[in-house]
Image (cartoon, rainbow, N blue to C red):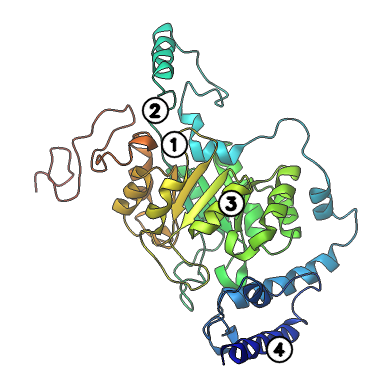
Amino acid sequence: MKKTHWLFTLTLACILCIANAFLAPPSTKCHLCSHIINHEPITSSKLQSSRNGAEDIYGAVHRKEYEMKRLNAQHASLSDPIRMAMGYAQEGIEQKRLAAALRRVYDDPYNPANPDAKEKSLEQLEREEKMLENGLAEATMRRGSFIVDIKRRSLSYPREQFARYDDASLVAEAMVRLGADVVFVNVDYHSYGGDLGELKSAVKAVRGVTNEAAVVMKDIVVDEIQLGLAKEAGADGIVLIASVLGPALDNFLNLATMIGLEVIVECHTYNEVKAALDALATNIMVSNRDRITGELIPDQAVKLAGMFPGSGGPIITIAGGGVTNTDQMKKLLAVGYDGVVVGKTVMGSPKAPEFIRAVRDRTLLPAEFSQWGLDDVEFDVDGNVMSGPKKGIPSASDDDVFL
């Protein structure tokens, strides 16, 4: 009986593959088939398409594959600017603007990656030498980064438009002026309400304000030509979704490295994080949102924080998904993440300055101390313990202390 059920499921999946053959490029393996190959059960909810309601990730991926098939045909010439952006290897030392922004190296006067770095005093060098002898070379205070995810709508909130701005470049410029370190610009119109034109204008707007903040293209990436689109638009990086690319993640990372495009790999599960680490991804975002089911698991990023090395290592980690208040941000930073991604909550909301200050106006203990029970201890930008404000505890520094 079980064998009969499995064969029925396989037959049904193949029928769907034939139906989608007109949408997906010939070289693309159907995502439904990959689930059978991996011996993962295909539930009825996974077989639902956008025909019965709002578009899910499966419908979005197949739609994107069809769009990229047409785009590849339009940009088939080797002299096409996008093909040229994909065809030339990065020469010289690559400028890691995204990594520098996520680590906030420009705010550290002694960081060697800071172009304006100062020489350390003899006392500081002696202190570092003692810390090295005791195995605490990287145990220094950290600076968290704030990443804003600019979008009008989302797959996670079907049929809901939570922002009505004219151009993403205006939002990107405003957020950077407020102190945002990185801006994600969504370019998928159907799911997120953005386009490539807004990405290009956002890059220009941000560069007009500062050369330190980074602009990242966010899309449902299914084809290598999308890396060329990001590079040609002037973006510093691109977001790759581990659950969408699967085993193809390695190839996308290799191409991005070759053309000088930084990458953030979005993960949700233990296996996805492990795959990203095995693929030598240097920037990893752990999302509380399950892309496959759309379910929000609030503490998923906290649970996976222990998979990464400590402070100052080669892996830069950020977290997000369903962040609605500053306490959630502080918790993610306290367990060791280098930055926090916030989207819907600050889109068209006066909360944006509050969220940015909650990240930037303080320093963080080294990630190695994340299990010491010091989550409620907050430090200012100079590393001094702050008297407040803390949740539910009045202090002399509270705005309403005299009310």
Q: Residue at x 48, y 20 (%)?
A: 110
Real-space Cα separation, disc 4 to disc 1, in angstroms:
48 Å
Viewport quadrant of the N terminus: bottom right
Q: Residues within 10 Å of mark 3 (few under 14, many from 20)?
A: many
Taking depth in this image into account, of 260 and 200 the one nearest to the observer is 260
Q: Position of residue 3 (x, y in %)?
A: 61, 88
Mark 4 and mark 2 lie on one chain; the one further toward the N terminus is 4
- Residue labelled with disc 3: 276
Left or right of 42 in this view: 332: left
Real-space Cα separation, disc 1 to disc 3, in angstroms:
17 Å
Give amino acid for label 2. Answer: Ala
Q: Position of residue 275 (x, y in %)?
A: 59, 54
Q: Residues within 10 Å of mark 4 (few under 14, many from 20)?
A: few
Q: Position of residue 281 (x, y in %)?
A: 60, 46
Mark 2 and mark 3 lie on one chain; the one further toward the N terminus is 2
Mark 4 touches mark 3? (CB < 8 Å): no
- Residue labelled with disc 2: 139
Q: Is residue 303 above or below residue 359?
A: below
Q: Secondary structure at mark 3?
A: helix
Q: Residues within 10 Å of mark 2 (few under 14, many from 20)?
A: some
Taking depth in this image into account, of 343 and 87 the one nearest to the observer is 87
Give the image quarter of residue 49: bottom right
Q: Is residue 232 above or below residue 44?
A: above
- Residue labelled with disc 1: 310
- Residue labelled with disc 4: 15
Q: Residues within 10 Å of mark 1 (few under 14, many from 20)?
A: some
